Image (cartoon, rainbow, N blue to C red):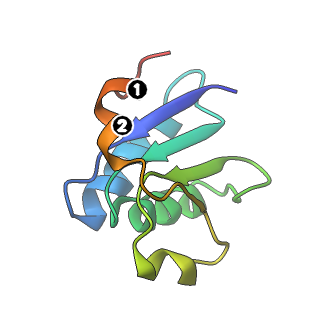
């Protein structure tokens, strides 16, 4: 599994833009990790716009358990309580 990270800083558009950049890489990730509660909404929009499907083509994982995320379709994996460890353990965008 090749992964990329997206930190959305509280904005949907950042998640969408960062995900689009990851998907445009020569060897795009098979999983995208987001650490902001709004980033996965934008990430999911970018994945759909690229003609990909979650989870068939790519996985989305979020390090937040914000209540609104359970309403995404399809649901994404949320790791509740992991926010404090993400800065030390998640590679930055474009890293492998």
Is residue 89 left or right of 44 when viewed as pictured?
A: left
Residue reaching furthest to the right:
56
* Percent x, y of residue 75: 64, 71
* Percent x, y of residue 48: 59, 63
Describe the element under mark 1 as helix, strand or loop.
helix
Q: Which mark is residue 89?
A: 1
| Residue at position x 41%, y 29% in the image | 90
Q: Give 38 or 53, whichever is nearer the viewer.
A: 38
Q: Give 61 or 29, whichever is nearer the viewer.
A: 61
| Residue at position x 71%, y 59% in the image | 53
Whole-number angstrom distance, CA of label 1 to CA of label 2? 5 Å
Q: Residues within 10 Å of mark 2 (few under 14, many from 20)?
A: few
Residue reaching furthest to the top:
96
Q: Is residue 5 above or below residue 94?
A: below
Tally of numbered tags: 2
* Percent x, y of residue 20: 43, 46
Q: Is residue 24 above or below residue 84?
A: above
| Residue at position x 48%, y 32% in the image | 4
**Among the 4 quarters of the image, the one containing residue 47:** bottom right
Q: Which mark is residue 20?
A: none
Q: Give 90 or 28, whichever is nearer the viewer.
A: 90
Is residue 22 left or right of 84 when viewed as pictured?
A: right
**Among the 4 quarters of the image, the one containing residue 70:** bottom right
Q: Residues within 10 Å of mark 1 (few under 14, many from 20)?
A: few
Which quadrant: the N terminus?
Answer: top right
| Residue at position x 35%, y 36% in the image | 85
> Which residue has dot 2 on it?
86
**Among the 4 quarters of the image, the one containing residue 30:** top right
Whether label 1 touches label 2, CB < 8 Å: yes
* Percent x, y of residue 82: 42, 47
Describe the element under mark 2 as helix, strand or loop.
helix
């Amino acid at each position: 599994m090749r992964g990329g990270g997206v930190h959305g800083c509280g904005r949907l558009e950042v998640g969408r833009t960062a995900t689009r950049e990851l998907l445009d890489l020569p060897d795009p990730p098979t999983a995208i990790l987001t650490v902001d509660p709004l980033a996965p909404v934008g990430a999911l929009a970018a994945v759909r716009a690229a003609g990909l499907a979650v989870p068939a083509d790519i996985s989305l994982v979020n390090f937040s358990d914000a209540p609104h995320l359970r309403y995404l379709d399809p649901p994404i994996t949320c790791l509740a309580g992991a926010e404090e460890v993400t800065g030390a353990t998640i590679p930055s965008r474009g890293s492998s």
